[in-house]
Image: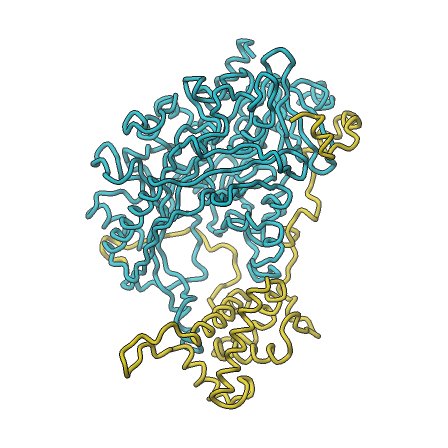
C-alpha cells in the first residue's frame, strides 16, 4: 500500500471501480479487480463485522429468551421468517422498520437480507452446485423462455477458480444434471442416508449425494478445517465456512488497492451529463445521514439481485426515464425465487441408533439432483424443468413423545430416527413477476423503496406436487414409517434465492446486461449478482453468481488494460 | 433519485461538511467497530443463564395461583427422577418471562389452558388443581393425556378432544422450557463441549445399518 495513494480523501478521487456490496459477489469483484492493480472502492451499507461477535459455541440457555426474543418479533417481523435469524445474531439482519417494501395484498413476498460486511455470506446455507447446459440452454430444449448468452463450457473455468479458492467439499457423481467440480473431501453420510442412497439408486436409478458445501473439510487457504460444532449461521471462529469478510474482502484490502467504506447506503448511480457514462454513485451515511458521492470509472453493483436493480431504478435520467440501463423495459422484470414446500419426512424404526448430544454436528445434508426432464428421462406430462432435494437422516431426541412423567422423560432420550427431504424447484422467469419503485414508500435514509409483485405459477405448483409424491415413494423404499407428505407452494422469497430483474442476453431489446454483466445501455455500469440470471435452474445459485462475477471481472480487467474503460 | 430529492426527504444534514476528512476517515470507516446497540446481547457476550434463579424472583405475568399451579403441573409433566425435573429447572419462571413478552393471543391461549385444568379439577374433585392430592392430579392428567377416542357405545368419533388440546399446549411449553434450560441440556447428556471431533457418519458395511 502506498501512502501517496491512500493519503487522500476517498471522496475526492476517482477510483477505477466502485463496487457496491460486500457479500459473496462484491467480495469477489473487489478481490479480482484490486489484485489486478485497479484502484477499487468497496461500499457496504452495513457496519464492519468482528469475529469477537461470533456466537456459534454459546449454548442456548445463555440467551435470555432462549431464541424467543421479543426484540426479533418487534424489529424483524419479516426477517424472523428466515431460519437463520436468531436471538444470537438478529442484529446482522436488516431492521424491517427501517427497510420497508410493499407487495400487492394477494402477493406476499418475504425478503430476507443482511446489511453488515459480508452480507448474507455470513449466514448463508453454503450449498454450492454448478449449473449445466441443461440449465443454460433450457429454452432451446423445451421452448420456454430464453437461453443464457453463455454456455457451461464458457463458465466452467470460472467455477474452477471459485471452488478452488472457496473450498467446496463434495463428492463427484458424474451426474448429467449436476457437473462435478473441484472438491475438497466430502463430509460423511449417516447410516440412514447411506441406506437411502443405495435403495434409491437400485429402485429408481437416481443419485443421492452428500451436500456440496462451502465448508472446508481440511485446512485450506489459511482457514481451518470444520470442527463440526454445527450452527454456522452464528459465525465461525475457524473461518471454515466461506464468508466474504475473512476471505475475498480481506484479500482485496491486503492488495493495498481497495478502500472499504462501511455504512454507505447507496441510493443511485451518477451519470456524466451528456455523455452516456456513469461517474460514480451517491450514498447516504447510515449513521450520520450525510449524503456523499464517490467517483469511479466503472460502477459495479453487487448489492443483491433486488437491491442492485433498485439502485438502477432509482438512477433514472432524462435519457433513461424508467431506470438506468432500462431501454429494453426488462429492468425489474423476471424476478425468480426457487419454489419450495414439496417433500416428505418419516421415521426409520429399524434403526436402533440413539440420539447423542455429544455427537459432532455436521453442518450439511444430502442432495438429490434433478431427475425430471433430463436428457435421459422422458419428458414429463405435467410440468417443464424440475427440482432437486435437500434433506438428511439421523437419530433425534423425541420431543414429541406421547404422555408425561417418567415415561415421557425416558422416551425423549430414547429418540427416533428420522429421515426426510424437501425440494427446491425451478422458478420460471415470467415478465409479470417484477419489482418497481413504490413512489409512496421510502426507507429510513429517504431512498425510495421497492414494490415486489411475485407469485409462483402452475408449473411451480406441479413441481411441488410431484416432489412430494416422489419423496414419499423414495422414503417408502427405505422402509420409512409415519410418512408425512407436504405438497405446498411456499410464499416466494422463502428459498432466499432471489434471481433475475436485470437479466443477461445477447439482444439489447430483451435484456439489461450482456454476457459480461455489463449493461447494454451504459458501458461502464455492471450488475454482478443474481439479478443477471436468465433462468433460475433449481440449484442453489451463489456458486454460479460468484463464477459469473469472476468471469465478468476478467473481462473488465482486459478492457482496462486496453484502455477501453 | 437525485441529491435534491434526498435533501427534500430530510435525510441530508450538513452535506457540505461531508468532504472534509482524509486518511483517518477511510480507516475509521473500514474499521468501525459495531456500536453496542448494534450487537445482540449474545454477540456482546451477555450470559443470562442465571437470571431466573435470582433471589426475590417475582412473576412478571402470572398471578400467584397461576404460578403455583404451573410449578406443580410442570413437576408432574417432567418430574425429578435420577435427574432433576422441571421444577428445579425453574420452568415456570422461564414460561412466565416469555408470556410477559408475548402477544395477547398467546397469553390468552396459555391462561385458557391453565384455567381449563382448574375447571376440570373443580368439576371432578371440587378443588383447584394445585390443592388436589398427587394421586388425583395424576388421574386427571392421565385422562387428558390419553383421550379414549371413539365412543365405546356408539362407535362414533368423539370429536376433537378439547381437554387433550389444552394438555398438549401446556405440555409443549413445559417441555420446551425444560429441555432448553441448562438442566435440560444435561438431561440429554450434553457434556458442555462445543465440538466433539470429526463427524464420522456411517461406518457399517453394506446392509448392516442398525
x%, y% of residue A354? Answer: 37, 64
Report which quarter residue B156 is drawn in.
bottom left
| Left or right placement of residue A48 versus residue A192 in this view | right
Q: Nearer the viewer, residue A375 or A235?
A: A375
Quick check: A295 left or right of B134? right
Could you tell whether A382 is left or right of A118 in the image? left
Q: Residue at x 61, y 39 (%)?
A: A116
The percent coordinates of residue A520 (x first, y second) are 49, 17
- Quarter of the rendering containing residue B159: bottom left
Query: Which of the colour schemes (rainbow, by chain, secondary structure, one colour) is used?
Result: by chain
Q: Colour of chain A?
A: cyan
Q: Residue at x 43, y 42 (%)?
A: A217
Measured as percent of width and height from the top left, residue A173 is found at: 29, 37
Tell me: residue A66, above or below residue A143: below
Name the residue at 27% across, 59% down. A480
Q: Identify the residue at image location x=21%, y=45%.
A: A204
Regarding residue A189, the answer to whether it shows in the image is no
Q: Is residue A495 above or below residue A139?
A: below
The colour with which the image depicts chain B is: yellow
Residue A228 appears in view: yes
Q: Which quadrant: the C terminus of chain A?
A: top right
Residue A192 image position (x, y, % from top left): 31, 55
Using the image as rendered, state which of residue A173 and residue A318 is in the foreground: A318
Q: Where's the N terminus of chain A, which quadrant?
A: top right
> What is the total number of numbered labels drawn onto the structure image?
0
Amino acid at each position: 500500500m502506498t501512502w501517496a495513494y491512500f493519503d487522500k480523501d476517498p471522496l475526492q478521487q476517482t477510483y477505477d471501480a466502485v463496487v457496491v456490496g460486500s457479500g459473496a459477489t462484491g467480495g469477489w469483484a473487489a478481490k479480482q479487480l484490486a489484485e489486478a492493480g485497479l484502484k477499487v472502492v468497496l461500499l457496504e451499507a452495513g457496519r464492519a463485522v468482528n469475529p469477537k461477535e461470533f456466537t456459534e459455541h454459546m449454548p442456548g440457555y445463555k440467551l435470555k429468551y432462549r431464541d424467543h426474543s421479543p426484540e426479533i418479533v418487534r424489529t424483524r417481523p419479516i426477517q424472523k421468517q428466515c431460519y437463520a435469524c436468531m436471538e444470537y445474531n438478529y442484529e446482522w439482519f436488516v431492521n424491517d422498520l427501517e427497510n420497508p417494501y410493499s407487495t400487492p395484498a394477494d402477493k406476499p413476498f418475504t425478503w430476507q437480507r443482511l446489511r453488515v460486511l459480508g452480507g448474507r455470506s455470513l449466514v448463508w446455507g453454503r450449498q454450492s452446485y454448478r449449473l449445466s447446459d441443461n440449465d443454460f440452454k433450457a429454452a432451446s430444449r423445451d421452448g420456454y423462455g430464453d437461453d443464457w448468452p453463455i454456455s457451461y463450457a464458457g463458465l466452467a473455468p470460472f467455477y474452477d477458480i471459485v471452488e478452488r479458492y472457496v473450498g467446496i467439499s463434495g463428492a463427484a457423481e458424474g451426474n448429467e444434471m449436476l457437473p462435478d467440480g473441484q472438491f475438497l473431501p466430502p463430509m460423511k453420510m449417516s447410516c440412514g442416508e447411506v441406506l437411502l442412497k443405495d435403495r434409491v439408486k437400485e429402485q429408481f436409478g437416481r443419485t443421492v449425494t452428500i451436500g456440496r458445501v462451502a465448508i472446508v473439510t481440511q485446512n485450506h487457504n489459511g482457514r481451518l478445517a470444520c470442527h463440526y460444532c454445527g450452527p454456522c449461521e452464528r459465525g465461525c471462529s475457524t473461518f471454515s465456512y466461506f464468508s466474504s469478510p475473512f476471505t475475498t474482502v480481506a484479500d482485496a484490502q491486503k492488495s493495498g488497492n481497495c478502500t472499504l467504506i462501511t455504512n454507505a447506503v447507496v441510493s443511485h448511480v451518477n451519470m456524466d451529463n451528456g455523455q452516456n457514462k456513469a461517474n460514480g454513485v451517491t450514498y447516504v451515511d447510515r449513521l450520520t445521514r450525510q449524503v456523499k458521492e464517490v467517483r469511479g470509472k466503472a460502477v459495479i453493483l453487487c448489492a443483491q439481485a433486488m437491491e442492485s436493480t433498485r439502485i438502477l431504478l432509482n438512477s433514472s435520467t432524462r435519457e433513461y426515464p424508467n431506470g438506468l440501463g432500462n431501454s429494453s423495459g426488462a429492468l425489474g422484470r423476471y424476478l425468480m425465487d426457487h419454489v419450495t414446500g414439496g417433500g416428505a419426512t418419516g421415521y426409520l424404526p429399524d434403526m436402533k441408533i440413539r440420539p447423542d448430544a455429544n455427537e459432532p454436528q455436521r453442518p450439511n445434508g444430502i442432495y438429490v439432483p434433478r431427475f425430471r426432464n433430463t436428457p435421459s428421462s422422458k419428458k414429463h406430462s405435467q410440468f417443464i424443468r424440475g427440482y432437486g432435494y435437500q434433506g438428511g437422516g439421523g437419530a433425534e431426541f423425541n420431543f414429541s413423545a406421547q404422555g408425561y412423567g417418567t415415561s415421557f422423560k425416558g422416551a425423549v432420550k430414547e429418540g427416533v430416527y428420522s429421515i426426510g427431504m424437501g425440494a427446491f424447484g425451478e422458478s420460471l422467469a415470467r415478465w409479470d413477476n417484477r419489482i418497481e419503485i413504490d413512489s409512496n414508500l421510502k426507507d429510513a435514509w429517504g431512498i425510495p423503496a421497492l414494490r415486489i409483485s411475485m407469485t409462483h405459477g402452475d408449473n411451480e405448483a406441479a413441481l411441488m406436487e410431484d416432489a412430494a409424491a416422489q419423496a414419499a415413494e423414495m422414503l417408502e423404499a427405505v422402509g420409512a414409517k409415519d410418512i408425512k407428505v407436504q405438497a405446498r407452494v411456499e410464499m416466494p422469497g422463502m428459498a432466499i434465492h432471489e434471481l433475475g430483474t436485470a437479466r443477461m442476453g445477447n439482444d439489447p431489446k430483451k435484456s439489461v446486461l450482456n454476457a459480461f454483466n455489463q449493461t447494454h445501455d451504459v458501458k461502464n455500469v455492471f450488475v454482478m449478482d443474481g439479478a443477471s440470471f436468465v433462468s433460475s435452474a433449481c440449484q442453489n445459485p451463489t456458486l454460479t453468481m460468484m463464477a459469473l462475477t469472476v468471469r465478468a471481472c476478467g473481462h473488465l480487467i482486459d478492457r482496462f488494460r486496453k484502455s477501453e474503460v | 433519485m437525485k441529491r435534491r430529492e434526498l435533501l427534500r426527504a430530510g435525510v441530508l444534514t450538513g452535506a457540505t461538511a461531508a468532504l472534509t476528512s482524509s486518511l483517518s476517515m477511510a480507516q475509521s470507516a473500514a474499521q468501525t467497530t459495531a456500536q453496542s446497540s448494534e450487537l445482540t446481547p449474545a454477540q456482546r457476550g451477555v450470559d443470562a443463564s442465571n437470571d431466573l434463579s435470582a433471589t426475590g424472583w417475582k412473576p412478571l405475568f402470572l398471578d400467584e395461583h397461576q404460578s403455583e399451579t404451573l410449578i406443580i403441573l410442570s413437576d408432574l409433566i417432567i418430574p425429578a427422577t435420577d435427574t432433576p425435573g422441571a421444577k428445579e429447572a425453574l420452568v415456570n419462571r422461564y414460561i412466565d418471562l416469555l408470556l410477559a413478552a408475548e402477544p395477547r393471543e398467546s397469553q390468552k391461549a396459555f391462561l385458557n389452558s391453565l384455567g381449563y385444568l382448574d375447571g376440570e379439577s373443580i368439576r371432578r374433585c371440587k378443588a383447584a388443581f394445585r390443592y388436589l392430592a398427587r394421586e388425583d392430579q395424576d388421574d386427571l392428567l392421565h385422562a387428558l393425556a390419553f383421550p379414549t377416542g371413539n365412543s365405546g357405545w356408539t362407535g362414533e368419533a368423539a370429536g376433537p378432544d378439547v381437554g387433550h388440546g389444552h394438555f398438549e399446549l401446556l405440555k409443549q411449553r413445559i417441555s420446551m422450557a425444560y429441555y432448553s434450560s441448562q438442566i435440560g441440556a444435561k438431561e440429554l447428556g450434553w457434556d458442555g463441549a462445543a465440538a466433539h471431533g470429526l463427524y464420522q457418519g456411517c461406518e457399517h458395511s453394506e446392509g448392516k445399518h442398525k
